[in-house]
Image (tube, helix red, strand yellow):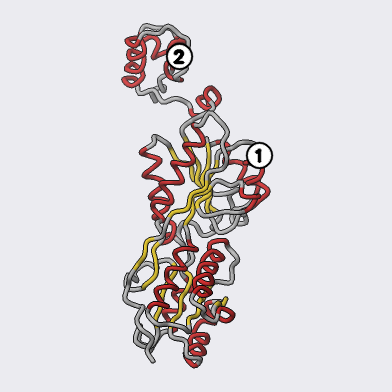
Amino acid sequence: MARAPRQADIAAAAGVSQTTVSLVLSGNTDGMRLSESTRRRVLKAAETLGYVPDPVATRLASARNHMIGVYTFASAFPTAVDDFYYPILAGIEEEAAALGQDLILFTGTGGLDARADDKTAIRRTRIADGCLFFGRHVPEEPIDWLLGGGFPLVYIGRRDELDGRIPFVGVDYVAASAAVIHRLVEAGHREIRYLRSMDDALSSSDRERGVLTAAESAQLPVRRIVARAADAEVRDLVERWRNEGVTAVVVEETDTGSLSTALLAALNGIRVPDELSIAVLGQPKNHPELSGFDVPRRELGRRAVRLLVNQITSSTARPPEQVLLDCIPVAGSTIGAPGW
């Protein structure tokens, strides 16, 4: 097997010293009297020989290796929830490629019993220049440790943990959810119910806040508008609400999509929107007819990469940058006038 080319080989091919080759390849030529023709000759020789620098050695020399990490706390990632995460990952890959960054996917400590929020696994992300994190919850101790050490990181999704010190690119679920309720009110609905997951993730709480804010402004009976339910309880809830005169149901769409799936299954025999209007806070796959909004997941990934690279390349400390993106309204066909 042929030996991989070394810097000494480049030096011999370019007719320069190995020190000159090292300086040119590292980009560390500040203060050096080095002609442009010499620099180009070194780079041409490296390309011709097929030289690939050792990433570990490059990092030790320059503190950067143009590699960013991706770490998720979703235990089933990516297979069980690929419909939700795929656009985010596609956006990450597109922007990383555009900015000349390689990606490292961190999968935790390994093994069937490994936990994605294990602090040792999370600290391993420091082998990259910075890391993107996403999941419905924040393991505060290891993330606080990374922030305290000045490690560049960006969360995908709004975060308020750790006294608001976490940089993020998130979604304005409050405004988007409020807009859906306003649309139902404008259509004439007064008896509306909001179906949300049992989880206390921040994205769920933001949706609920938007629903309640809009309901209060419309003077709806907010005390009974929100219902937390497991998937198995949805069918009975829908039947009860129909008996109570409810004319519209709004449901949260999470990464698994199980709650909206349970609602759609419970509508068997109910004419939508003639008998019951339906709206979803987040667009389920393969259901373009559903009214509500879509989450700009691809742009989430792209913006998160840009924010992270800005952190990595910045020469000065700055407050954590926190960005909220607008959701995309989906007209759909499942909101109509109340079917009295």
- The kind of residue tagged 1 is Gly
- State which quadrant residue 138 falls in: bottom right
Q: Is residue 9 above or below residue 165?
A: above
Q: Residue, x 60% and y 66% (percent of image)?
A: 200
- State which quadrant residue 126 falls in: top right
Q: Is residue 212 left or right of residue 301?
A: right
> Quick one: 190 or 170, which is closer to the camera?
190
Q: Residue furthest right?
A: 141
Counting from the top left corner in percent of width and height, residue 326 is at: 42, 57
> Quick one: 228 or 107, which is closer to the camera?
228
Q: Is residue 240 left or right of residue 35?
A: right
Q: Earlier in the sequence, mark 1 or mark 2?
A: 2
Marks 1 and 2 sit apart, C-alpha to C-alpha, by: 32 Å
Residue corresponding to mark 2: 29
Q: Residue, x 39% and y 25% (percent of image)?
A: 1
Tell me if I can see residue 71 in this picture: no
Q: Residue, x 49% and y 73% (percent of image)?
A: 259
Residue corresponding to mark 1: 148
Residue neighbourhood size for the residue with mark 2, other residues' Cα within 10 Å, grouped as few (<14), some (14–19), many (≥20): some
Label 2 element class: loop
Residue neighbourhood size for the residue with mark 1, other residues' Cα within 10 Å, grouped as few (<14), some (14–19), many (≥20): few
Q: Is residue 336 left or right of residue 70?
A: left
